[in-house]
């Protein structure tokens, strides 16, 4: 099959061009909306062409940088190559690439870390500026000019609506059989004229399988033939397995206590090895007929679908290892009936998360003894990846879990600290903290009660006495003891690490 065969709207054949030609259509300073969500469906060839164009402009003494907006993270061949060429001035709302992270933390790229559910609507409201160009990966274009999405949706429909110009990448490496897996619905009427979103179950479909675009805005179509980022996940280690076991046992107990329905509520799981381990725990757990309502479908959720433990998984992107993606392609007819890919506005919509009663599980960098969570900053100042969708789900879920091993860097860093060095989720949003040491259920507890449970259940033994000593002294010296702190010492653990390479004192 040729790329022309995938462009069934034949009038667009004349728009086929090289990536270099398409890149030259993007002016310096442009706001560019790109497809891409957690390593899925990002442009595969345009970013390298943009990087090459930027280098040529810089060599000629001309400035060239663009502002890049996506759904979430992309890959080294997207974010990485553009960052290396110093082709990006602003980036939002999420990044996981090493080189782009360096540019952000060096101050060379202005990074706007946003709740993912906020991005599309703030763009539509005009809060972020005017969008000049959209670059969106698709699998094919139908006879009537509709776009068949690839493995991720993210903010693609919003970018297509807003942009002055549209460049499409038709990825020949993606299976055409994904057609029909997507459910694209937009409620982009501005307040106060919005109407309710008619989703009552995780498997409801209310939209169309296609992205829509004004074909008069399409200025270029570029062929690509490359897989998504290989999201390599480690086999669950003992710490991850222990965290998963605590969560599965807790959910079973909640059902026995009558606080969870026997049929369970839809599951959301964040990105990473610990999250995948939790899903693996559900695979061997007692729960049946599960539903997924999440932002990213990873290997672990695919395993649940294949085993018949999960009935349907709803997400905005499929982000898999190479091995899992092969299974997805080989059994795509099976998965197409069980996977729904939605726009990010729907997958992360706060009202839907609240109404459907999602059980949310997300990772963190550190937690403090009162339940404040840092998901984004290392030692308070260096951006890791971004808040992503964790805030969307944590604040609005039926139950939320924040998970991490109790230590990092060969036990030199405690992930439970007196005060977090950066706050992404306040104590008001945190229900349950889990490490391999134990599970702290913070529901219905005041700050001093929380501190006792967090230190006892979640702290590593190497740091438990140190935390208890801090808390005891704060309790007896703080002027107010609703939330006892010694302000001159609250961040001393982080300072000690920066000076000595360890939090152990």
Image (cartoon, grey):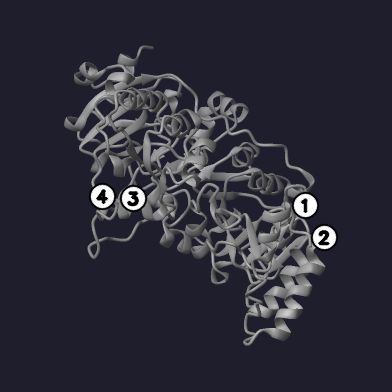
> Which residue shows up at 61% across the image and 49% down it?
289
Counting every numbered tag in the picture gives 4
The answer for how far apart the CA atoms under marks 3 and 1 are is 40 Å
Q: Gap in Å between the C-alphas at discs 3 and 4?
A: 12 Å
The secondary element bearing badge 2 is classed as helix
Q: In the image, which is nearer the foreground, mark 3 or mark 1?
A: 1
Q: Which residue is mark 2?
A: 462
Q: Earlier in the sequence, mark 3 or mark 4?
A: 3
Q: Earlier in the sequence, mark 2 or mark 4?
A: 4
Q: Earlier along the polypeptide chain: callout 3 or callout 1?
A: 3
Q: Tell me residue 58's x, y (percent).
A: 33, 27
At a point 58% along the width and 40% down the height, the residue shown is: 298
Q: Quadrant of the N terminus?
A: top left
Question: In the picture provided, is 308 more to the left or to the right than 154?
Answer: right
Q: Describe the element under mark 1 as helix, strand or loop.
A: loop
Residue designated by label 4 = 129
Q: Are marks 1 and 4 in contact (CB under 8 Å)?
A: no
Question: Is disc 3 in contact with disc 1, using a CB cutoff of under 8 Å?
Answer: no
Spatial CA distance of label 2 from label 1 is 8 Å
Q: For the residues labelled 2 and 1, say whether their Cβ atoms are less than 8 Å apart.
A: yes
Q: Position of residue 295 (x, y in %)?
A: 49, 47
Left or right, 44 with respect to 146, comes to right
Mark in front: 3 vs 4: 4
Which x, y percent locates residue 187? 29, 53
In the rendered image, the vertical position of residue 64 relative to residue 468, given as above or below? above
Identify the residue under disc 3. Answer: 120
Q: Callout 1: few (<14), some (14-19), or many (20+) C-alpha neighbours within 10 Å?
A: some
The 10 Å Cα crowd at callout 3, few under 14, some 14 to 19, many 20 or more, is many
Q: Secondary structure at mark 4?
A: loop
For marks 3 and 2, the one nearer the N-term is 3
């Amino acid at each position: 099959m040729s790329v022309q065969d995938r462009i069934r709207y034949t009038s667009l054949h004349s728009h086929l061009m090289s990536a270099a030609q398409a890149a030259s259509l993007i002016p310096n300073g442009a706001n560019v909306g790109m497809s891409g969500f957690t390593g899925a469906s990002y442009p595969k060839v345009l970013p390298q062409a943009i990087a090459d164009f930027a280098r040529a402009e810089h060599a000629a003494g001309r400035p060239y940088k663009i502002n890049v907006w996506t759904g979430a993270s992309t890959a080294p061949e997207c974010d990485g190559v553009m960052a290396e060429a110093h082709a990006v001035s602003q980036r939002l709302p999420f990044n996981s690439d090493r080189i782009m992270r360096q540019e952000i933390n060096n101050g060379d790229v202005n990074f706007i870390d946003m709740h993912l559910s906020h991005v599309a609507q703030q763009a539509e409201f005009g809060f972020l500026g005017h969008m000049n160009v959209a670059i969106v990966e698709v699998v094919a274009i139908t006879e009537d000019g509709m776009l068949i999405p690839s493995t991720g949706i993210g903010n693609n429909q919003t970018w297509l609506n807003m942009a002055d110009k549209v460049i499409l990448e038709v990825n020949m490496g993606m299976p055409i059989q994904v057609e029909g897996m997507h459910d694209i619905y937009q409620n982009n009427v501005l307040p106060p004229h919005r109407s309710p979103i008619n989703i009552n179950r995780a498997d409801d479909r209310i939209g169309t399988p296609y992205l829509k675009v004004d074909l008069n805005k399409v200025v270029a179509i570029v062929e690509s033939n490359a897989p998504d980022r290989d999201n390599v996940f480690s086999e669950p280690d003992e710490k991850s397995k222990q965290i998963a076991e605590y969560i599965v046992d807790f959910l079973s107990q909640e059902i026995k206590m009558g606080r969870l329905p026997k049929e369970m509520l839809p599951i959301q799981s964040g990105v990473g090895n610990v999250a995948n381990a939790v899903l693996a725990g559900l695979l061997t757990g007692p729960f049946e007929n599960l539903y997924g309502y999440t932002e990213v479908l990873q290997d672990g959720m695919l395993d649940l679908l294949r085993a018949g433990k999960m009935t349907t998984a709803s997400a905005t992107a499929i982000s898999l290892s190479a091995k899992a993606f092969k299974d997805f392609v080989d059994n795509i007819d099976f998965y197409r009936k069980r996977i729904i890919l939605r726009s990010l506005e729907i997958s992360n919509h706060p009202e839907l998360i609240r109404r459907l009663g999602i059980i949310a599980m997300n990772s963190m960098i550190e937690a403090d003894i009162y339940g404040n969570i840092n998901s984004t900053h290392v030692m308070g100042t260096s951006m890791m990846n971004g808040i992503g969708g964790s805030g969307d789900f944590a604040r609005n879920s039926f139950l939320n879990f924040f998970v991490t091993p109790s230590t990092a860097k060969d036990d030199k860093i405690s992930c439970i600290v007196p005060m977090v060095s950066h706050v992404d989720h306040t104590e008001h949003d945190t229900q349950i903290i889990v490490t391999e040491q134990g599970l702290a259920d913070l529901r219905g507890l005041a700050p001093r009660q929380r501190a006792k449970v967090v230190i006892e259940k979640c702290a590593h033994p190497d740091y438990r006495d140190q935390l208890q000593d801090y808390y005891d002294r704060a309790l007896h010296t703080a002027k107010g003891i609703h939330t006892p702190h010694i302000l001159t010492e609250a961040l001393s653990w982080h300072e000690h690490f920066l000076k000595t390479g360890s939090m152990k004192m």
